[in-house]
Amino acid sequence: MERISWDQYFMAQSHLLSMRSTCPRLMVGATIVRDKRIIAGGYNGSVSGEAHCLDDGCMVVDNHCIRTIHAEINALLQCAKFGVPTEGAELYVTHFPCVHCSKSIIQAGIQRVYYAKEYKNNPYAEQIFKVAGVELIEVELDEAVLDRHYQDKLNLTVLLLKELEKADLPEERMQELLKQTRSIYTKA
């Protein structure tokens, strides 16, 4: 069995962290890595001890939730809190960083940012990353690597669909099932 790549491993960690997010507007996770070792992780959520968006709703001002701290900042603050240097480290994040996070990432000495999805990429953020020499690399998470039985499940699904075709299911119902299957096994 082939092991997953480092990029997929760290990006999967960021996606896992995003599942802890307490802001439903966008669930983001970030993992800081140095020398192929995770040194910190963060997700977007409220200040410790404060109410969460999931519980009390978002506090939106100028189309931004001011209740949350972004995942990248939470990961950087974790390093600061525990005295872990970030100079020369890499950041894996589920979504392209906002301009404010981008400035903090640069100031923290992060040398590479791997992101899974573009998200309202600000041209100024892209510019300052370039000027600072921070490499930006898109690494889409291959969710199939997270499931050791993915191929077996896909093969069984195909077999079941073929059996349903033989069972003379109404065409409309068959098309519904095919559509549902495609939505599960393909990217939107």
Image (cartoon, rainbow, N blue to C red):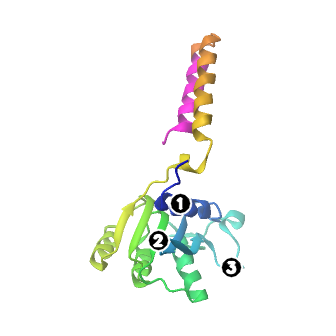
Q: Earlier in the sequence, mark 3 or mark 2?
A: 3
Q: Is 15 positioned to the left or the right of 91 in the image?
A: right
Give the CA separation, mark 1 to mark 2: 13 Å
Q: Which residue is mark 3?
A: 48
Residue 170 is inside the magenta segment: no
Residue 42 falls in which quadrant of the image?
Answer: bottom right
* Image height of 150 relative to 101, above or below: above
On the question of residue 49 being in view, the answer is yes
The residue under label 2 is 91
28 relative to 126 in the view: left or right: right
Can residue 185 be found in the magenta stretch? yes
- Residue located farthest toward the bottom when viewing the structure as drawn: 83
Q: Which residue is mark 1?
A: 9
**Of callouts 1 and 2, the N-terminal one:** 1
Residue 104 percent coordinates (x, y): 44, 81
First in sequence: mark 3 vs mark 1 = 1
Report the front residue among 4 and 121. 4
Please state if 2 lies on the left or on the right of 130 as rendered: right
Image: 132 above or below 18 = below
* Tag of residue 153: none
Q: Which residues are magenta?
A: 172-188
**Disc 3 and disc 1: Cα gap in Å?**
28 Å
Where residue 172 appears, x then y in whole percent? 58, 17
Label 1: element kind: helix
Q: What is the x, y in percent for residue 128?
A: 31, 76
Could you say which is closer to the camera, residue 183 or residue 35?
Answer: 35
- Asked if residue 151 is positioned above or below residue 81 in the image, the reply reads above
Rendered view: 86 above or below 29: below
Q: Residue at x 59, y 41 (%)?
A: 150
Q: Amino acid at mark 2?
A: Leu
Secondary structure of the residue carrying numbered label 3: loop
Of the residues shown, which amino acid type is indicated by label 3?
Ser
